[in-house]
Image (cartoon, rainbow, N blue to C red):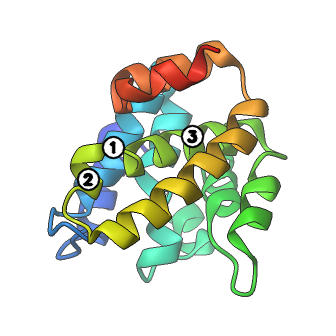
Amino acid sequence: MKTLAEVDALADRAHAGQTDKAGVPYVAHVRAVAAGLAPLGPHLAMAGLLHDIVEDTEWTTRRLRAAGIPDRVVAIVDAVTNRPGTAYEEKIRRITEDPDATLVKIADNAHNSRADRSAALPPEQRERLAAKYRAARGVLWAAADPADIATILRVVNPGLLDELTP
């Protein structure tokens, strides 16, 4: 079985050369997601590191298993991976069928919702994505334990904590 450090190194190699929309190395995003999940256990942190690997690299779920990634981690990664022809809203509903995948997507959403990440985007795109992520939070947060959500938000995007408490 892989250690968290080995999975981090795998994610670093897999996302080498990739940058986000602001030009930041992409691995910083998956590491931020993993950091928010780390207090909830190593499998969730591993899934955070790998959550975009199937979608954005040549890696497959089969290859992840062959590399020694635990089956549960691979299942979570598969659950949060986009499927061609599936609408975003449907994807979010599907993710909520798996409690661990829900937490990974909450951490991903929280990091994607950070003002410092969206600041580099054109205003129209920033507003569209903010609305998309806000709507997704309504579905994701309803499917998760508020204490787990707060644990993630404290690390990934404390600014969202105000939304968590009515």
Indicate the position of residue 78 as horizontal and vertical percent values.
66, 63
* Image point (65%, 50%), residue name: 136
Q: Is residue 3 visible?
A: no
Q: Quadrant of residue 139?
A: top right
**Quarter of the figure with the C terminus:** top right
In the rendered image, which residue does mark 1 sit on? 114
Q: Secondary structure at mark 2?
A: helix
Indicate the position of residue 24 as horizontal and vertical percent values.
15, 62
Q: Are marks 2 and 3 in contact (CB under 8 Å)?
A: no
Q: Is residue 148 left or right of residue 151?
A: right
Tell me the tag on residue 106: 3
Residue kind at label 3, given as amino acid type? Ile
How far separated are the C-alphas under marks 2 and 3?
A: 16 Å
* Image point (19%, 63%), residue name: 120
Q: Are marks 2 and 1 in contact (CB under 8 Å)?
A: yes
Q: Is residue 68 left or right of residue 9?
A: right
Q: Secondary structure at mark 1?
A: loop
Residue kind at label 1, given as amino acid type? Arg
Eyeballing the image, is 27 above or below 110?
below
Earlier along the polypeptide chain: callout 3 or callout 1? 3
In the rendered image, which residue does mark 2 sit on? 117
* Image point (23%, 74%), residue name: 18
Q: Nearer the viewer, residue 17 or 155?
A: 155
Indicate the position of residue 153 as horizontal and vertical percent values.
45, 26
Foreground mark, 3 or 1? 1
Q: Is residue 151 left or right of residue 72?
A: left
Indicate the position of residue 76 as horizontal and vertical percent values.
66, 51
Earlier along the polypeptide chain: callout 2 or callout 3? 3
Around disc 3, counting alpha carbons within 10 Å, would you say few (fewer than 14), some (14 to 19), or many (20 or more)? many
Residue kind at label 2, given as amino acid type? Arg
Q: Secondary structure at mark 3?
A: helix
